[in-house]
Structure formats: structure tokens, C-alpha cells
Amino acid sequence: MPAPDPTPPASAPRDPRAADPGAPAPSPAPRRPDRKETGTSGPDMNGIVGSHDILLVTLDTLRHDVAAELAAAGRTPNLARLLPGGRWEERHAPGSFTYASHQAIFAGFLPTPAAPGPHPRLFAARFAGSETTADGTFVYDTPDLVSGLAQEGYRTVCIGGVGFFNGRGPLGSVLPGMFQESHWEPEFGVASPTSFEAQVTRAEDVVRELPDEQRLFLFVNVAALHQPNWFHLPGATPADGDSRATHAAALEYVDRHIGRLFAAASSRRPCFAVVCSDHGTAYGDDGYTGHRIGHPSVWTVPYAHFLLDHTPAEAAR
């Protein structure tokens, strides 16, 4: 049986069907990064690192097929308007569960395009013989991207979601321990039906408290899609359990609030954003349930990167 991510004990959640308070902030207008020919066209990260804030969002456990279907149906408009052509890119996850995948992502191995390569990477540690380090790759001389950006003067901040980021015990401290500053509370975790709202509020606080001149690398691990997610579907009960439909409802919930996160991330200067899943999960596909398995529902993930223009906080209100 696949082992789920460790999670905090469930607490009594607020009513998940209550209306979301307030109107979500609109997403800043995206634009494609300046491109530099490197054999394969891609953004020149050496021009972005140092001049932009950087946002990395992992939509933990999000399946590519569900994300693509919702974008095509207009059910995730705030995300879709930022995606090139309004579509998610199909990629392969670097791991089949949260811990393994994030270790790879933080080492510079973002999900790989689902097509024959090689595929130049955005970020890479200096490594002799690398075939995916190109002219536009930001190369760092530290073991991981987080410390590499810190060496460039970035404040590195983690806002955790699933149990691998909860800081409770040695295992839950490894990933958040890479950052200069990390945040996790039960309200951010998988048992909370308002987890993403709470995470975004914390992100807004982090950005607000930084000096204007301080560059920021902000990482947010979104827990809302991870099991349990039944409470995101109106009318569902615990007895109904999790399903592909509740997974989709959880993504719609995230979409309603992600504009606030993008607005905060771009409120101080232009921001380069990467939004992707770390792995998918199975809901009875070919008899499988969960993740940490080698199944297309787990390995195939959605991915996008884009630039957010500087939108001062006053203008985003």
C-alpha cells in the first residue's frame, strides 16, 4: 500500500461550504520571460536572478489530467490566465511522493517536459558533465537552489503545507530546514478546509514585513489537494471519501485565492513564478490508490512558469 505523507492530527475544521470571505485579489498580468537561445529556447535565468523576486508554488498531489480538464472548462480562471495559451504543460515528476520530489526540486530538478530531451534546466548546481545545464541556466555553487539563492542575497522563506513541512520531529524538519525562515501551523495542513487561505495570509505578512530592497525567494507547498480533500466538494460527507471530483473541487478552491498570492509576490518588484505539482495521485486508476507508486496518474504532473509584472500593493487592492 502506498504510504501517505505524514500529517498532523485532524482537528475540527470550519464549515468547508461556507462562502469565501471577501473578494480575491485579481492576478497580476503575466508575461513571458525574455528568451535567450541555448540550443532550446528558454528564459535566461541569469538575468532574472538578482533582479526579480522568485516564487515557487508546489500544488501538492495535483494530477495533470484534472488540472488540464479544469483549465479547458474555464473552472480555474485565475490560474488559466497565467498559463501560456491557457494550458498547463505536461511534465514528469522527479519523484512519486512529496519528500523525494521536493529533494529533487530543491536541487534544481523541476518536473521534466514529457517529451524526448535533453531539456535545459532553469536552475542547476555546478556539476561536471551535466547535459541539462545551458547558457540560460542559473548555476550555483551550493548543494541546493535554496542556499544558492541565499548566497545571491535572497531571503529564503518556506510556507509549508503537508506533513513533510510541519517541523514536528526530524523528518518533518529536513525540507523546511533548508530555508532561512519557515512557517507551518495546523491551519496550513491537509486537515484544514481553509488551508490555502491561511497560507496566503501568512505569505502576505511575510512580504509586508520585508525591507523594500530585500530580494525574496518564497516557496509555498499547497496542501489543499492532498488527501483528505472530500470537504472541498459541496454536499460531500466523510463517508463519501476522496475522489477525482473532490480533487477537482480542491483545485477550484485554490484558484479562488491564488490571485492574492501572486499579487503579494509581485508587490515589491517583478516576480518570476514557477507553479507545478510535485506528483499526482491515484483514485482507483487501474486498481491503484494514492501515490509513491509508478503509475501515470502519479508521474504525470502540470507545470508552468511565467513572469508577474510589478504590481504595487496599493494597485492590487
Image (cartoon, helix red, strand yellow):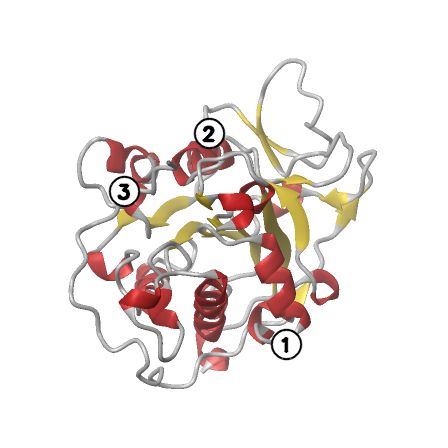
User: What's the amino acid at mark 3?
Assistant: Pro
Q: Going 43% across and 55% down the picture, which residue do you hit?
A: 213
Residue at horizontal 33%, vertical 58%? 228
Question: To which quarter of the image does residue 28 belong?
Answer: bottom right
Give the residue pinned by disc 2: 144
**What residue sits right under mark 1 in the picture?**
74
Front-most of 66 and 177?
66
Reading the chain from its start, which is encountered first: label 3 or label 1?
3
Quarter holding the C terminus? Answer: bottom left
Query: Three-letter amino acid code at disc 2?
Result: Asp
Q: Disc 3 versus disc 1: distance between alpha carbons?
A: 33 Å
Q: Is residue 201 at least partly visible in the picture?
A: no
Q: What is the x, y in percent for residue 186?
A: 21, 57
- Residue 87: percent from the left, percent from the top? 69, 62
Q: Nearer the viewer, mark 3 or mark 2?
A: 3
How far apart are labels 2 and 1 at the CA level?
37 Å
From the viewer's side, name the closer residue of 27 and 92.
Answer: 92
The N terminus - image quarter:
top left
Circle on res. 6: 3
Rendered view: 104 above or below 219 = above
